[in-house]
Image (cartoon, rainbow, N blue to C red):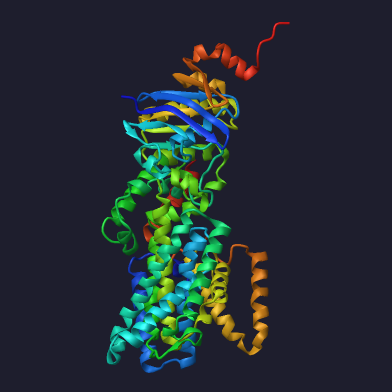
Amino acid sequence: MKIDRGEIGTAIRTMTESRFFMPSLIAAGFVLSLAVSQFELLDPYLQLIIMYVGINIILTASLNLVNGYMGEFSVGHAGFMAVGAYTASILTVSVFPGGATTLFFPAAVLAGGLVSALVGLVVAIPSFKTRGDYLAIVTLAFNMIVKSLIENLDAVGGPRGFLGMEKLTSLPWVFFWTVTSVWIIRNLVYSNFGRGVLSIREDEIASDLMSVNTRHVKLLVFVISSFFAGIAGALFAHLLQYINPRMFDILKSTDILIMVYLGGIGSIAGSIIGATTVTLLLEVLRPMGLWRMVLMPLLLVVLMIVRPRGIMGLRESCWFVPLRDVLAAKLRRALKETADVSS
Amino acid sequence: MSLLECRDLTHYFDGLCAVSDFHLSLEPGELVGIIGPNGAGKTTVFNLITGVYRATGGSIRFDGREITGLSPSEITSLGIARTFQNIRLFKELSVLDNVRVAHYASVRYNAVEALLQVGRYRAEEERVSNHTMELLAAFRLDNFADEPAKNLPYGMQRRLEMARALATQPRLLLLDEPAAGMNPNEILQLMDLIQWVRETFSVTILLIEHQMRLVMGICERIKVLDFGATIAEGLPGEIKNHPRVLEAYLGEEVSL
């Protein structure tokens, strides 16, 4: 039988343009993740790597919201992660009843996100006054404050770290939170507020003069971004079952920054690509030992020369653009072509 | 009642007086021009009205309401929109999004509805997109809706700025040198466009311009500024031969 390539292309397009496509894909993924963790279909090491990828996607997408979409330069994302990790860990270890931790785990993760979001609210306030380098210094200071604060809090182990968590983070949970964070961030980007975020990046004064309430938008962005950083921290803590303040230092923040800028600023597809590439590469290159710390920056230098805005840089995969926008654009293109032909 | 009322508006940049005792009263439906040599304080007046700067002294009332001290976004939501001397479009955003952004204040869904895509989200997004396409079609930009704004030729960027300003549904439109960088032919077209905008969207227009042809051709009243002070005010015919205006532009007359 002869296979018509064009027909397959059309079939795939019709399929992806159905509004049931993404929900069914996500449902299938969730069932798969459930099956894998239930029946040990993959070896534990591979599962661990996949979970790291998921957590890093959450971190990258949420940082991209501030750095890529809004055009600020936050360098303290690991600080929010630490807040989420410690909040959730304290809850599961010391607060929630011992026998039912699995039951309370979602609440602990959510609490980690919420406390982190509250802290994000505080960090958003300086962003009303400063931009660029100065805001970067504020977030850098925030990261250092969080780290030294935890180091000096003996109740949570200080510099020795905090342990005693059960391994509650599983593949389905990571899948659930990754999808949720990507979905929510994508919804934000393609809403009235999202357009406000983009316009702040392009020209803050013009944005204000086009009726965008820039303060509201900035608050919303910092709250959402830090919320998901906190969620990622909570998942991370219950995956590793041990956390210490040094895990959340400025180097961790830098790692997330690398994922954002490698994948591409202002792009959800870019965040996913960036987080996946860096996480997998670091694992694959593990035999190189210390040399991988040389290779990664080199890779980044090459990328900045070849594609200064990252792999996706300000472009988006049509999978993440709302269907009605995709279809409207397609219709406009078709109308234009017919107009060109007839004239 | 006048739509816009500036009284004793004064603004200092440290010690430098940019605008002093500026008075202006705009009736609904008027088309008024502000002219003056470079550095006369014209754009500063716009920045004071739109809330970019906070006036050192004086008051601004819009539609009977005191707007001195409000933030730019609040003032825009009340119905004052503007364009910029050196075009300030959102360069990387599409033509469509440039205009959609300007609907910000009129959108009736909250953050939760947006994040979960429930409630009024869908209907409102549809309304914004439709209204945007109508505006773009009216400004003959609908064929470029998906282009990044930076790719448009200069004249179209000027038109897009006007469309974007009108998307905020203003009652007063401030145009800051709309004819900058245009040739005589384009200026004629622009004059028609401004008249058309005024009638179609029933807006009051206040414009800053250097091109005398445009100002004399379409403005009903003209105000002349020099070094922050109002030196003349009146009908185009009166301004043309006003001795202080000639002095400001051409220098003092000397008898030889």
- For the residue pair B160 and B110, the one nearer the viewer reads as B110
At horizontal 32% and vertical 64% (from top left) the residue drawn is B116
Q: Tell me the quarter of the picture where residue B28 sits.
A: top left
**Image location (x, y in percent) of residue A287:** 63, 90
Towards the viewer: B171 or B233 = B233
Q: Is residue B193 visible?
A: no
- Residue A343 vertical placement versus B108 (above, below): above
Residue B255 in percent (x, y) is at 70, 6
Is A201 situated left or right of B138 in this image? right
The residue under the point 45% across, 56% down is: A197
Check the image and report above or below for B217 versus B19.
above
Q: Nearer the viewer, residue A121 or B97?
A: A121
Task: Determine the residue positioned at 50% across, 33% down.
Answer: B11
User: Could you tell whether A310 is left or right of A64 in the image?
Assistant: right
Residue furthest to the top in view is B256
Classify residue A119 as left or right of residue A305. Answer: left
The total number of labels drawn is 0
View extreme (left): residue:
B119
- Front residue (pair A225, A184): A225
The residue positioned farthest toward the right in the image shown: B256
User: Where A59 sits versus A243, above or below?
Assistant: above
- Residue A47, visible in the rendered structure: yes
On the image, which quarter does residue A324 sit in?
bottom left
Residue A166 image position (x, y, % from top left): 38, 91
Image height of B256 relative to A242, above or below = above
Q: Position of residue B126 (x, y in %)?
A: 33, 51
